[in-house]
């Protein structure tokens, strides 16, 4: 408690210098939270999206990026398709329960807020493939000129049951609103497979979703499709493979964002270390006096470390607030730049815990060199120090 009291007293004694250190940590932690929240949000939504599907095997074009978001700028958007003739053959396999072709496309947002992601699905199968979807308004009937909107998309576009959405020369009537949670499904528009084929000139399916009778034999279905059919230009992925491929993209994004925020962390560490070095040299006589009256080295060092950690933690707490605000602003910018119809960033509890740990780390590293100086202090020389 003595070390804490003396550390707090010294922080308040040099307020201007302490404030500059707090600012450095605040910017570092805030940048970390804002940047990494994008990857955190993407990972969270991808996981929820995959959990909301009753799909065990995916057949997708080799050129397609395996992102559940569908078209995301140019990522995940390919003109290659799967020929529909393979669908009936896949359905005849022993362990296959259901086969659901998916046609992905995109519409220009009526409100000009971004691109609307559209899924063309079989009206009789899509609810079985996506059991997490719950109807919150209207019904989930997909006719030739009807569309069902995810709740997030409907709210963003200000659409309700009975309204219309125009895509090209075709006008679709909103017949229902569905909700699944926080995944991407809440930001999709759903139309019938027939309407999707008509809009894409019947090029084929963007993906083929397969549900198995026995999930323990999923790999067997994958091997059968690969060896028996050898679908040209296609790759066959199990649920785990698909999720793993999607997470690879997210991991690369996380590394990039972490690298950018690491620059701010290095600056914060430098600021903290500079502050503690100046404080240590100013208090050299005080430390020597404490040692002379019997204080242990660990007691004196704890004063230095405690002061540094207090500054960093306070700066980190304010940095979290700054990061949450920055995440919201960055999220809006990404939505505009990538023309998205859904938010990306997400502030999660693990992210805030990581941010707090980062601020403590900055404080400990910032106190490293000053602690070494105090450990090796010569009592006589320290008492004479000017």
Image (cartoon, grey):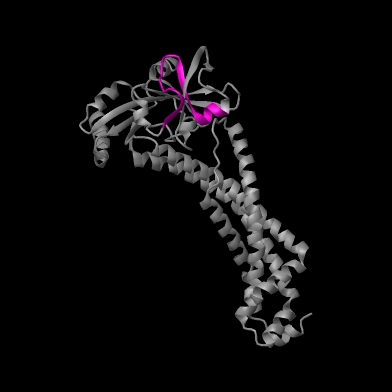
Q: Quadrant of the N terminus?
A: bottom right
Q: Quadrant of residue 99?
A: top left
Position of residue 150 measured from the top left corner of the image (x, y, whole percent): 48, 28
Question: Residue visible at 24% across and 40% down?
Answer: 217
Of all residues, the one furthest to the left in this rendering is: 94
Q: Quadrant of the C terminus?
A: bottom right
Of all residues, the one furthest to the front in this rendering is: 137
In the image, the segment drawn in magenta is 133-155
Q: Quadrant of residue 14?
A: bottom right
Inspect this view and state whether residue 5 appears: yes
> Is the residue 330 above or below the residue 30 in the image?
above
Residues 156 and 60: in front is 156
Residues 180 and 15: in front is 180
Position of residue 337 measured from the top left corner of the image (x, y, whole percent): 60, 33
Is residue 21 on the magenta stretch? no
Is residue 142 on the magenta stretch? yes
Tally of marks:
0
């Amino acid at each position: 408690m003595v070390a804490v009291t003396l550390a707090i007293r010294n922080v308040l004694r040099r307020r201007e210098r302490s404030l500059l250190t707090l600012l450095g940590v605040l910017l570092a932690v805030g940048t970390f939270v804002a940047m990494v929240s994008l990857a955190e949000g993407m990972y969270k939504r991808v996981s929820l999206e995959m959990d909301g599907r009753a799909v065990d095997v995916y057949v997708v074009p080799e050129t397609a990026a395996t992102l559940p978001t569908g078209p995301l700028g140019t990522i995940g958007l390919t003109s290659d398709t799967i020929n529909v003739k393979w669908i009936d053959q896949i359905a005849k396999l022993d362990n296959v329960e259901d086969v659901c072709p998916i046609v992905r496309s995109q519409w220009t947002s009526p409100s000009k807020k971004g691109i609307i992601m559209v899924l063309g699905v079989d009206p009789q199968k899509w609810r079985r493939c996506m059991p997490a979807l719950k109807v919150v308004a209207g019904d989930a009937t997909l006719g030739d000129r009807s569309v069902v909107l995810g709740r997030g998309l409907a709210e963003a576009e200000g659409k309700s049951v009975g309204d219309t959405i125009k895509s090209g020369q075709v006008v679709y009537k909103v017949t229902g609103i569905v909700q699944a949670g926080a995944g991407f499904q809440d930001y999709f528009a759903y139309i019938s497979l027939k309407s999707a084929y008509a809009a894409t000139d019947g090029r084929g399916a963007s993906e083929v979703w397969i549900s198995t009778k026995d999930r323990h034999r999923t790999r067997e279905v994958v091997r059968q499709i690969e060896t028996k059919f050898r679908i040209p230009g296609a790759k066959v992925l199990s649920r785990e493979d698909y999720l793993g491929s999607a997470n690879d993209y997210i991991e690369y994004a996380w590394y990039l964002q972490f690298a950018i925020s690491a620059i701010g962390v290095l600056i914060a560490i430098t600021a903290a270390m500079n502050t503690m070095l100046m404080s240590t040299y100013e208090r050299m006589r005080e430390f020597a006096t404490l040692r002379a009256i019997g204080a242990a080295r660990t007691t004196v060092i704890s004063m230095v470390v405690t002061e540094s950690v207090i500054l960093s933690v306070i700066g980190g707490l304010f940095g979290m607030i700054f990061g949450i605000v920055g995440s919201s602003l960055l999220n809006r910018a990404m939505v505009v730049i990538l023309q998205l119809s859904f938010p990306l960033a997400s502030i999660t509890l693990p992210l805030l815990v990581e941010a707090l740990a980062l601020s403590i780390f900055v404080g400990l590293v910032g106190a490293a060199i000053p602690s070494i100086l105090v450990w090796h202090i010569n009592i006589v020389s320290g008492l004479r120090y000017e």
